[in-house]
Amino acid sequence: KFIGDGKEQLDPDTIRRTVNTVLTLKNDLNNLKENGVAAFHCLCKTGWQGLTCNDDVNECQLFNGTDIGCQNGAKCINVPGSYRCECNAEWKGIHCTDKHDDCDGASNNELCGHGTCVNVARRVSGQPNYRCACDQGWKTDGVNPACNVDVDECSLSKPPCSVNPPVDCFNFPGSFSCGNCPFGFTGNGIACTDINECLIDNGGCSQSPRVQCTNTYGSRICGPCPPAFIGDGVTCTFSGLCTQNNGGCNAHAKCVENGGDVSCECPDGYTGTGIGPNGCNVVSNSICSSNPCIFGTCIGNAMKTGFTCRCFKGWSGDLCTVRVNDCSSNPCKNGGTCINETNFAGFTCICDVQWQGSTCEEFRESCGAYFEEPLGYIKYPLTNTVWNQREINCVWVIKTIIGKVIELNFTNFHISTSEHCSDDFLQINDGENRDAPKIGRFCGGLSQLKNSGIFKTTYNHVYIWYNSKRFDVEDNFELSWNTTNPECGDILEGNYGTIQYPPNGGLYPPNRDCYWLVNVKLSQRIQFHFSSVKLENHKTCDFDFLDFYDGSLWHLLASYCNSTQPSPLTSTTSTVIIHFHSDNISSDLGFHLTYSAVPGVDGCGGTLTAEKGTFNSPNTESFNNEITCEWLIQIHVEDKIILHFSQFELEHDAKCEFESVSIYDGNNEAADLIGEYCGTEEKLTIISTKNTLFVKYRTDNVRSHKGFVASYETYCGGVYTSNNGWFQSPYYPDPYPANKKCVYHIQVEPGNIIHLSFTDFDVEDSWFGCENDFVEIREGHQENGTLIGKLCGRSRPQMITSTVNELWIIFVTDSTIHNRGFSANYSTVNVGCGGVMKNNTGVITPPYHWQMPYNASCNWLVVAPPGFVIRLNFEVFSITSHGGNCNFESVEVKEFDGTSIGKYCGLLNLHAIRSKSNVLIVSYKRTVFAPSEGFVISYTTENISSNCGGLITAEIGYIRSPNFPAVSPQNSNCSWIIRAESGHQITLNVKTFDLNNDNCSTEYLEIRNGQFSNSPLIGKFCGTKIQKFILSHSNVILLHFVSSSLIHG
């Protein structure tokens, strides 16, 4: 209640406190009786409220936004005394805080098979959802997520095994394997590289006499045997001087050998030297004068009343007109096929598998045989073979040419399987008997054979033994063999490995040259450990030897030629070539070694793949032995490399034998050598033609120089000299790289202009005139020539046409936005005049007037080397002049800075003009058709320091000190004689004069009244003091300029 008379004014806070007190008392009275004895108070359970706890609590409203409310987008539903959460499909739990992981429902193998389970957000509540990331070689069936379907890699549109050359691909569940690279290639089956057979042993082609070996893709071709030898180029046998091409004699002549020479004798009825196609001519009026023997030689009888014909090989008949068919008599027996040899050299019989011999006359035993043939075929069993014995033993021995080896190729193989192949087996021995080293014992199917059923022997024999304990088995196999060149050696890449020769044990064969190439990373070195070395023992290693070459065949690391166990051997490079050689005298057990990669010198070599980088010769104080460092720079496939040496100071010697840097245009030493450098080099810069550069640094153990520091970056641009072509920005159509400057220089023959068209253009635009990325087009003899345009944005520019024959396209990018770039092409049009003239001498002349359209112009830029000036001589000058002005036709000569020397027209006898700098511009313009004789201007270049002075007879002209307006070269000494016509005087008008002011002792101009050095002196001048005009007293005046001072005006 309120106390007061009602006249007092209460403040709001007092009223608020009073109301709260009254409300509290009221609530207490509702729960307590007035005397307080029977009072009660209800303690409500969770979810209920009110005096008697009959009012439900709305938890959804109360807990909304708190940790005990429904989470993760769940729907909250209030129920009497509580609440519940309806979770989204991906969540579970009382408050929807637990996420479903459907990969936990079973094992990974049960869910995905050959894959890994990856949980996926559920789309439908209560329905599990996951996917399987399949292992390599497996896929799903498109319906179920499990990876239980094998990927047949061999049936893919781009199979994993080599396509060119083709290599067999074998699919396995979850994997695949590639067969061996075919003969003539090396590699792992995925990639096969052609072997250059000609590099070793002349490719198997004859070496005595030597026959040209030509490498082909997958093989090689042997050239023809030289004259007096016959053969296929692999083997050349001396056949006599007369056997080939009749010894050089005429076809009618008789070739007679006389020691090391031949003589040619014409038959009766013929006369001549007998040599060559016209060596024998029919005697006129003889019986043979009508050449009655068509393919033969006519021989008249002694009475000259008749003749006989001696037919050429392959022809017969009275007049040699019937072609001989050697197969007409059916010489091949027992079903053999006869084939006429080319050049009518006989026939060859192709025998059925059960027969052999030159005419298939010998029966081939059904089990086992001895062959001395370069190629053939073995089939077991032969058709209709019947066995009577219980155990079967068959032996085939094949022998081929000495120095060659045998290659076996099984096309079918099925022998009953037994443990260790103890019952039925086929055994192959690398030699002529069972005691020779065993290549292997085999049973089972073709897949059980090593190397896909292809075996190569070490010698020219092979022993094949088939054994079966039961005659009723259905064993069968087929193989073919051919003779080939011995191959030993390999290309080995990896951190470790084993090399053994012979590979099957036993004695190594004679006359072998085997090469192994061992490669590791460029920053590593190779260490060899020897298990045994047993070679023919000689002091000089000239017979049998094992050589190790460090990096190339020029650097021998070690040589062994005895029976020993050498200490470990470590290379100084990342590549070692091993060469084993045996002669034809004696043999031993060969060698067995292992190798492994070991760390190289820190900072010595490596592979560099960044767009730019630096490297340098290693710290020479940290090692005492000879070292070799190799760097491979390999960048984007479409880029080239520019390599700069900011420091290059190595030991100098004439042959660079002690310390050098060798640079190769490719990825190894087999690439083209750009150069080998030693001593001191200034501003050494190398530009590659490919995306790889190989840099090799080699030094001995005596070092006293600074070494080198090199940097590289990607190089774009280039010089284009063909009449048409195309080029693109780097990486086009992919985004171009940052911070690049690419210069494309189109340089065609003078007399041509260039049309440049952009087929695509997308370069970062700029609000302020192409300030970020841009393309500049300039013309002239240098990169900063006349600007034609500066381009950016995405609009394809219009075609650009030059006025001369050289165009520069400069593409510059910054570090921010990188667009697609551009693609451009160009073509040329011959306009008959104009261009950049860079030769030391030349002629400038326009085309005939009827070949040149109206309003045409031609511009020539004559460019001399630095330190030279240009002298123009007007040989002929007769062009149209209209009222004394040059509006219709004119020739203007300008300095490179644009200063006009003169504009000429009409019929003039012009004096010679010498330029101030090394560039001179000659412009010819024609606005109307007006026939004229035209002009011929010759030019020469003159060295500023030596070609100054001379005799001048022109009526007007000018003289400049050498290199004007720059300082004159030291020790300049120039004399000019100006001679006018008799009765005339000469006036000198001095425009500029500024020499060293040293009392005219080291730099001065001396002028004399006459042509001799003792003619009357007009004056000797230096500093800046000289008369403005000087008048001669006669028609001859001498100017003598001397500059020997280090300080010049």
Image (cartoon, rainbow, N blue to C red):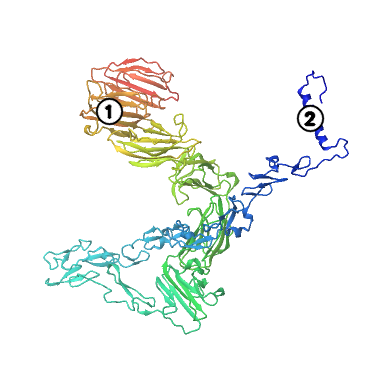
All told, the count of numbered labels is 2
Mark 1, residues whose alpha carbon is within 10 Å: few (<14), some, or many (≥20)? Answer: some
| Corner quadrant of residue 1031 | top left
| Quadrant occupied by the N terminus | top right
Residue in view at x 36 percent, y 42 percent = 725
| Quadrant occupied by the C terminus | top left
Task: Compute the Cα span from label 1 to label 2.
Answer: 110 Å
**Can you give x and y, in whole percent of width and height, for residue 861 in the image?**
33, 31
Instruction: Determine if residue 1012 is in view.
Output: no
Left or right for 526, reference 275: right
**Can you give x and y, in whole percent of width and height, for residue 345 in the image?**
29, 70
* Badge 2 amino acid: Asn
Vertical relation: 800 (above or below) 234: above
Vertical relation: 1047 (above or below) 271: above
Q: Residue furthest bottom?
A: 388
Work out whether residue 324 or residue 590 is closer to the camera in this orientation and state it: 324
Residue position marked by numbered label 1 in the rendering: 925
Residue position marked by numbered label 2 in the rendering: 20
Work out whether residue 919 or residue 264 is closer to the camera in this orientation and state it: 919
In the rendered structure, which disc, 1 or 2, sits on the residue that comes first in sequence? 2
* Badge 1 amino acid: Lys
